Image (tube, helix red, strand yellow):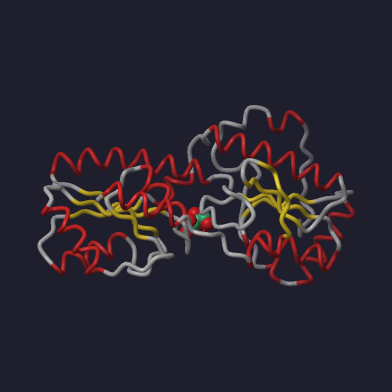
Amino acid sequence: MIEGDFVEMDHASVSNIIQLGGTVLKTARSEEFFHSEPRAQVARQLNRAGIEGLVAIGGDGTFRGAHDLWTEQKAPVIGVPATIDNDVYGTDATIGFHTAVNVAVEAIDRIRDSATSHDRLFFVEVMGRQAGFIALAVGAAGGAEMILVPELEVNIQEIYDTIMSGVKRGKTSSIIVVAEGDEEGGALEIAHKVRELGPIECRATILGHTQRGGPPTAEDRMLASRLGAAAVRALLEGDSDKMVGRVDNKVVRTPLVDTWSEKKPFDQELYELAKALAA
Ligand code: F6P
């Protein structure tokens, strides 16, 4: 946008891509966009190309930039939440979240085969930046014995004690899901610290970018289709500076500022349920 390097797309541009992971549009973080002169340049380029509205697809960084573009330049913008982290207020799910969770759950099912065969404890690290939404969903759906998230403080001694109480009850293998943003560290670090407390045979696996690729789930495909259409509709109605999201199965519009200034609530109930089921 800064360079005015636009490619016109039509119906054919989106044929046969619904099953693809990643993005055909490409994506990158832009340092320049943090400054107002490049944003003014973007507005000039949009004008020159006859572009009347912008659909900003991403997370809070994308939305902050889009909001600045609207407030400074009055370029109409509508946000579409797309990040595996699901850490955006104003939508129950972000595009990519379900797929990432499914990939991680499938990985856990496979790791569990090793865990049970070898009577081992595994720490499995999932992405999510500073949020534990992926870890919670993966842990609950994967039947994890423990879920470690940045939203809730659990220290190494408590982790060790939980593992040992499982062992005393006859558990011979366990899976502990670790959110990458957990305050005790990632899977490797936590495994190391736990081993220092006692002779526990354990392994650590970091799922990393495997969670960000592969065919999107049906849920993600439907969400992306609905929110994409809703974004265009919002622009056609003359709306701007909002994000379209899905809340309680309805498409809603939330002011862009709220999407990063309001905190998406952590599902404590699901966390407690997963804990109870693992006990
Ligand atoms: O925000 C999405 C995300 O995948 C995070 O979960 C992760 O921390 C980060 O991006 C990784 O970013 P990069 O691909 O730049 O290493």
Q: Is residue 145 above or below residue 113?
A: below
Q: Position of residue 144 (x, y in %)?
A: 30, 48
Q: Residue at x 85, y 49 (%)?
A: 51
Q: Position of residue 2 (x, y in %)?
A: 76, 60
Q: Is residue 158 above or below residue 224?
A: below
Q: Position of residue 74 (x, y in %)?
A: 86, 62
| Image position of 119 (left or right of 30) | left
Comparing 119 with 42, the one in front is 119
Q: Residue at x 36, y 50 (%)?
A: 273
How many labels, in total? 0
Q: Is residue 134 above or below residue 106?
A: below
| Image position of 94 (left or right of 130) | right
Q: Position of residue 234 (x, y in %)?
A: 80, 46
| Image position of 21 (left or right of 183) | right
Comparing 152 with 31, the one in front is 152
Quarter of the figure with the N terminus: bottom right
| Image position of 236 (left or right of 63) | right
Q: Quadrant of residue 70?
A: bottom right
Q: Quadrant of residue 64?
A: bottom right
Q: Residue at x 78, y 47 (%)?
A: 6
Q: Residue at x 84, y 58 (%)?
A: 75
